Amino acid sequence: MLLVRRREFLAAISLTAATQVAAQERQPDLRRVQAAVDSFARLPVTSSCFIATDHPTPWTVGHDHRARLFVGSAVKTFILATYLRDVEGGRLTLDQQLAINDDVRSPSSPVFMKLTGTTEARSVLEAMIAHSDNTATDAALKAVGPERVRGLVREAGLSATQIPDSTRRMVSYLAGAPEGVDFGWEGMERMAHGQLAGPPRSPMNDHQTMLSTAEEMVRWYQRALKGEFFRKPETLLEFKRIQAMADSLWHAVPADTLAYGKGGSIDWQDFHCFALSGQMMVRGVPVTFCFTINWTGPADGVASVFEAYKNSVAEALNAAAKAIL
């Protein structure tokens, strides 16, 4: 009996040692990821990024990931989610007609800029995410109400995240309008010709803006893409379907990799921003990320900064994909 117990004891020790060795062997090599993030941090801008995986071996790599920066249209994910939750609740539908006209027309609208009429809400949401159309965004915001979107942001515990009343009200405020004043479409056209209401304001403000942190955007996508904010599987499916349409994703994620997310940018006076947040699936493992840069400088330097930003983000996401065992 004593011999049997001794053998069992030795076998247990061997099993424990083998398990520890196997666990050590399964630890991801994050040196390339860290090197890529360090390279991103050296860009001559104010930068913040965060990359996180939940399993099989959870890890995070980041740079100044709690910095509150302007993320632009990346916040449109919250508008999409709010609309889909209202569909779940029976308040709205995806096939109802939403008006596209001068009441909601906003600058930077590659889909709806010159169109007037009505179209399905589903198409409006797709234009908002796939092409970052601001007229679509304001049509969707008008349907759900900005306070309902802010309610979802609070429910998600995202205390550093802020959305505007509409993209047009934000532009009006940046162009010198009093808080809450909408210039209207005619005012937007005057503004495009340099006619401002007063001294221009910075996008980094506490009134009409699009702010967040890399950490909060990662936390949002980790939870939202698990369906935590939806009651029905079909709602999560629609959320994923539309978020997968964002054109900015394909500048950065590895080739042939499924990804969900949304980018953002702004060029206002001498202030500029690029942001990209979302999640990619690597061999069944979700890798969630956010990369944001803000800087001031001349307009003729934006293209070169974007190229460096895009390449740096792609390098980091490729390294993160290779770290998944």
Image (cartoon, grey):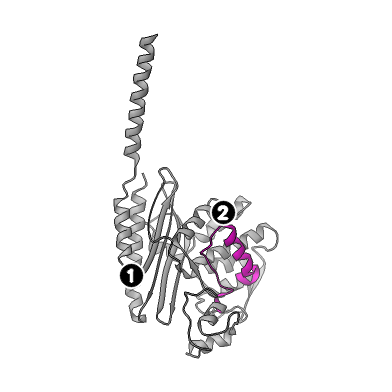
Q: Position of residue 88 (x, y in %)?
A: 66, 57
**Quadrant into which the C terminus falls:** top left
| Outermost residue to the right | 90
Residue identified by numbered label 2: 237
Q: Position of residue 216 (x, y in %)?
A: 48, 59
At 48% across and 81% down in the image, what residue appears? 201
At 32% across and 38% down in the image, what residue appears? 24
Callout 2 crowding tier (Cα within 10 Å): few <14, some 14–19, many ≥20: few
Q: Secondary structure at mark 2?
A: helix
Asked whether, in this view, residue 306 is left or right of residue 106, the answer is left
Q: Position of residue 194 (x, y in %)?
A: 47, 90
> Up-down: is 200 above or below 42?
below
Q: Say which of marks 2 and 1 sits in front.
A: 1
> Up-down: is 143 above or below 8?
below
Query: Where is residue 303, by image quadrant?
Result: bottom left
Q: Amino acid at mark 1?
A: Glu
What mark, if any, has residue 307 been given in the picture? Answer: 1
25 in magenta: no
- Relative depth, front residue between 291 and 139: 291
Q: Tell me the distance, in whole angstroms, between the alpha carbons under discs 2 and 1.
A: 33 Å
At 33% across and 29% down in the image, what residue appears? 18
- Relative depth, front residue between 61 and 134: 61
